[in-house]
Image (tube, helix red, strand yellow):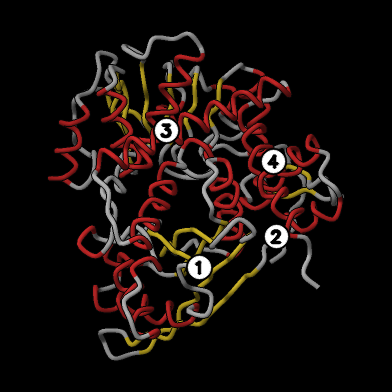
Amino acid sequence: MAPDLLLPTNHQIMRPDKDRFLSEENPFEAMMSRFDRAAELLDLEPGLYKVLRHPEKQITVSIPVMMDNGEVEVFQGIRVLYNTSRGPAKGGIRFDLNVTMDEVTALAAWMTWKCAVVNIPFGGAKGGVVCDPLKMSVGELERLTRRYTAGIIATLGPDSDVPAPDVNTNERVMAWIMDTYSMRVGHTVTAVVTGKPVEMGGSLGRREATGRGCMIVTRDALRHLGMEVKGATVAVQGFGNVGSIGAQLLQGEGCKIVAISDRTGGWHNPKGIDVNDAVEYVKQHKTLEGYGKGTAISNEELLELEVDVLLPAALENVITTKNAAKIRAKIICEGANGPTTAAADAILDEKGIFVIPDILANAGGVTVSYFEWVQDRGGYFWTEKTVNDRLEEIMKHSFAAVLQLAKQHKVNMRTAAYMLSISRVATVHRLRGIYA
């Protein structure tokens, strides 16, 4: 789907292959501008460049659902398989009113590069349904999920397309997808999704995996820059699964968490915040609103605090050309997908901020999803220690590989991560050739 054309402003970027400007916050264009930079440095041949710049499949389905009041509503569902040259497509499914084809395609491409940068044998996919799950009952959500699954079932399978939870979806939604697929094929297929309940083939350590991956690469970045891990100050935007677990694990390594926030706002305490206490508060009150153990600050103010590490683990496009010059962190670990716009990258570079890009920083989740898939297919399940040890090995090796490439080519970590992942996908395409 072509993005909407916009008039140029100071906060827009140009596609290199088109004489036009597009929104700085367009997710697909932001991803592709980084792809183009890496492809240029790799001297990617024109034909392969064209192949990797286009998704393999973009599926749109109508989802009629009988609502609790007896009326029928029709929702739109999307599934994008961006590239499957290295293995089955892998990517989450989100339920949200803001789901668009551009967003889903960008996220599917990000998944392609993310899987390649940590060298796991998956391609990239993403899916979504345009809906407001907060206004739907459990029964309505189940009927929506099962009908969406039926609509895309031709692509699903442990050897072809393996979904996972994403925004507003969870273990229960994955259980419904697995059951719908299994009923259709006539036998239980646990490996068709990941992020399932442990009782039905989920992996130990999966819930903590993304936050744990953020902790591992942040710790390695601090050491690389000659900074002490113990006592390093950290601000965390987003106190959901990734942000809260990342904060807990960094605190466990000796870091001082000085600011946390969620959609209701944030709290800043230079003496340090007891993350475990904050997690318990959120369990009881659902949000950080009213927490009170520090000075109240906005999400925007949190981003601009003078800290050693900034962990944006909430939304896309929170660091833009409007605020990048005000960022004072020494390290940014991108726990969220796409928290920094492409146009803001140059500003952060100029300030000398060390950015651990999203396709590396938050790849712990898909890595342990891979472990879950392996365990399901083998019918043999690992201890949580085994999962965590193997995750640490992969994250440390991947960080070192990206860092080495960044030094070799004198580029930032984001460009190096894209170069590494694109080169791995391109290599497989060269070996496989084009089927005719």
- The local secondary structure at tag 4 comes to helix
Task: Read off the residue under disc 4.
Answer: 34
Q: Amino acid at mark 2?
A: Pro
Task: Read off the residue under disc 3.
Answer: 393
Tell me the quarter of the image containing the C terminus: bottom right
Q: Is residue 291 visible?
A: yes
Q: Amino acid at mark 3?
A: Glu
Q: CA distance from mark 3 to mark 2?
A: 39 Å
Q: Is residue 352 above or below residue 46?
A: above
Q: Is residue 320 above or below residue 304?
A: below
Judge by depth and name the residue closer to the eye, 198 or 313: 198
Q: Earlier in the sequence, mark 3 or mark 2?
A: 2
Q: Earlier in the sequence, mark 2 or mark 4?
A: 2
- The local secondary structure at tag 2 comes to loop
Q: Residue at x 39, y 52 (%)?
A: 369
Q: Earlier in the sequence, mark 4 or mark 1?
A: 4
Q: Residue at x 72, y 63 (%)?
A: 2
Q: CA distance from mark 3 to mark 4?
A: 27 Å
The reply to whether discs 2 and 4 touch (Cβ–Cβ < 8 Å) is no
Q: Earlier in the sequence, mark 1 or mark 2?
A: 2
Q: CA distance from mark 1 to mark 3?
A: 25 Å
The reply to whether discs 1 and 2 touch (Cβ–Cβ < 8 Å) is no
